[in-house]
Image: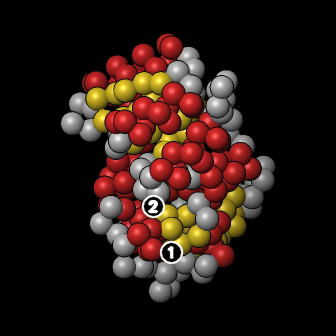
Amino acid sequence: MTRILVIDDDADIRYTIGEICAFAGWQAVTAANGREGVRIFRREQPDLVIVDYHMPVMDGLATLEQIRRLDPLVPLVVLTVDEQQAVADMLMAAGATDFALKPIKAPDLICRLKVNLKIGALQKKVPAEDVFIAKGISNTTMQVIIDFLTQQQEALSIEQITGGVGLAYQTVHRYLAYMENAGLVTVECNYGRVGRPRNFYRLAPGGKQT
């Protein structure tokens, strides 16, 4: 059975996520802080880890770094109320795979975890030297975004891509920024009539990877 380690100092959140995991057919093991979470991770070797960002004893960032040193491939999903992209970029550079925002919504969390479990399984089939192509950028996760864009006829917003691939907005934003710099996507700016201009993304000619 798929095992998910939930590290959060809030007992109610641990219980809620445990019930969501049980509903989805997964086994949840829990820890009340990062130090305990790292110890349980060593013992249980779970298939995915959910880590709260704000915790006493050992915060989410330190917990991420320690678990990532133990296992370079396990999906690490950060649970947070902070939607700042700068914070997301910092956490991804430390080893986070994706994000889940509070308050928790069961359908969204199940979808997010399914996508990350799939990515984790795919990464195990990739040579270790090919998993990460840049700091905080997984080749497997990027391929999920590329595969989705390959099927699209029109340029899409980040929100549309986020909904299509099942990853967090912050994760998709970071990957699209990398892909734009690498020439894998092109960006079209729609100024509209009201508000700030919005970027729309499409796969660049020759941007598809294998």
Determine whether, in the image, residue 51 is placed left or right of residue 151.
right
Q: Which of pointers 2 and 1 indicates the residue nearer the eye?
A: 2
- The residue type indicated by label 1 comes to Leu
- The residue located at (61%, 79%) in the rendering is 182
Residue placed farthest to the left in the image?
1
Q: Is residue 143 above or below residue 28?
A: below
Residue contact at pointers 2 and 1, CB within 8 angstroms: no
Secondary element under disc 2, as helix, strand or loop, is: helix
Q: How would you rate the neighbour count of disc 1 (Cα within 10 Å): few for under 14, some for 14-19, many for 20 or more? A: many
Q: Is residue 210 above or below residue 112?
A: below
Measured from the top left, where is residue 1 in percent x and y? 21, 36
Residue in front for this viewpoint, 161 or 4: 4
| Viewer-closest of 85 and 195 | 85
Disc sitting over residue 37 in the figure? none
Q: Secondary structure at mark 1?
A: strand
Disc 2 versus disc 1: distance between alpha carbons? 15 Å
| Residue ID at (66%, 76%) | 181
Can residue 143 be seen here? The reply is: no
Q: Quadrant of residue 33?
A: top right
**What residue appears at the point 42 percent right and 79 percent down from the top-left corner?**
209
Residue 141 visible at all? yes
Where is mark 2, residue-wise? Answer: 141
- Dot 2 crowding, Cα within 10 Å, few <14, some 14–19, many 20+: many
Tell me the residue at 50%/68% (across/down): 132
Residue 203: mark: 1
Quadrant for the C terminus, please. bottom left
Single out the residue that lies furthest toward the top. Answer: 12
Residue 176 percent coordinates (x, y): 59, 65
